Amino acid sequence: MVESARRAPGVTVGRGTWVLRAVLCWAGLAGGFAVGVWEGPARGQEDRKGPGRRPQRLALTPEQELELGRQAYRKALQEAGREVLPPDSPEAKRVRRITDRIIKAAQIEPLQREINLRVKDYRFEWEVNVLRDDRRANALCLPGGKMLVYTGILQVARSDDQLATVLSHEMAHALAHHASERVARGKADGVAVLRNKAYDRQQEAEADHIGVFLMTFAGYDPGEAVHFWERMGQAGRDKGRLPEILSDHPSDAQRIRALAKWVPAARAGKKAYDKGRIAPARR
């Protein structure tokens, strides 16, 4: 997610963050766009294995998750109004071109299996709109695959590889069902956790991990992920505040160390896949 949790006084909160926090609060506190009242984990979702085969409890069924994202997306676009760029604008075309490649990578079964993504029975309605706001270095992906990208991030992500870093990270949140997991955690541990953060640092690190593999399998250079986050951290230090893209994220040093470790593994995985050395799925 993209907004600074450690923002300086007077720094405005990105609307993308507001959208996702609203999704979590609506789902957790008020039934969330008619997804129903909390009655425990969604059937079949109790303590199943999530990304990396870690335990993951989800609150929403696949149908609820999809509808939540749909309705939040419609509301966000209505509020954005004329800030939504035409589909044939250069910015929208660039974002869609990169997004389409990442979507195809996310459908690669050996990659899904290696990450242990829960995609069976889930429907993703991938769609992206670009909003004109050069002050927001911001992007987000709602449950079910609806995405918003602010033009401010296009000025920071100078190359397609760097923009793929951001888009892969955000799409990873949806593929890993992080919003549903946050709702489940909030109901178990108190709703304050939903009001406090969009995603926690474990989920942000996980989105980094998944994202670097997605962008690599989409044909982008994962080394640029390291360079991008280094630049974002430096931009925050230069301005005396964190950019919106660093919301609730791991520290700069943690992130860079982790990404530097994952990049060789992502490259090796893509090379093995291209050469047909990936084991077929078990039947």
Image: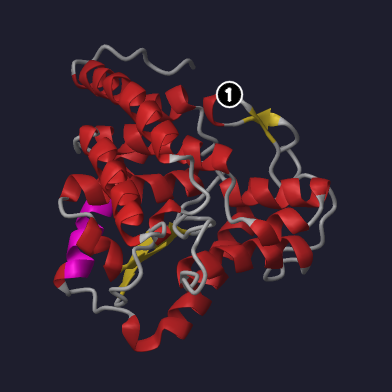
Q: Main secondary structure of the magenta part?
A: helix
Seen at 24% across and 23% down, the residue is 267
Number of numbered markers? 1
* Horizontal relation, residue 245 to residue 192: left or right: left
Read off the residue under disc 1. Answer: 53
In the rendered structure, which amino acid carries the disc numbered 1?
Arg
Seen at 50% across and 33% down, the residue is 117
Q: Residue furthest right?
A: 39
Q: Residue 92 lies in magenta, yes or no?
A: yes
Around disc 1, counting alpha carbons within 10 Å, would you say few (fewer than 14), some (14 to 19), or many (20 or more)?
Answer: few
| 57 or 150, nearer to the observer | 150
Q: Residue 205 lies in magenta, yes or no?
A: no
Q: Is residue 26 visible?
A: yes
Location of residue 195 with respect to 159 vertically, above or below = below
* Horizontal relation, residue 248 to residue 111: left or right: right
> Picture coordinates of residue 62 (x, y %)?
61, 50
> Picture coordinates of residue 35 (x, y %)?
71, 63
> Picture coordinates of residue 11 (x, y %)?
46, 71
| 109 or 153, nearer to the observer | 153
Seen at 47% across and 15% down, the residue is 282
Magenta segment, which residues? Answer: 91-100
Query: How did the renderer colour the structure?
Result: secondary structure
| 98 or 240, nearer to the observer | 240
> Picture coordinates of residue 174 (x, y %)?
49, 49
Q: Can residue 209 be seen in this view?
A: no
Seen at 57% across and 37% down, the residue is 202
**Which element type, helix, strand or loop, lies under badge 1?**
helix
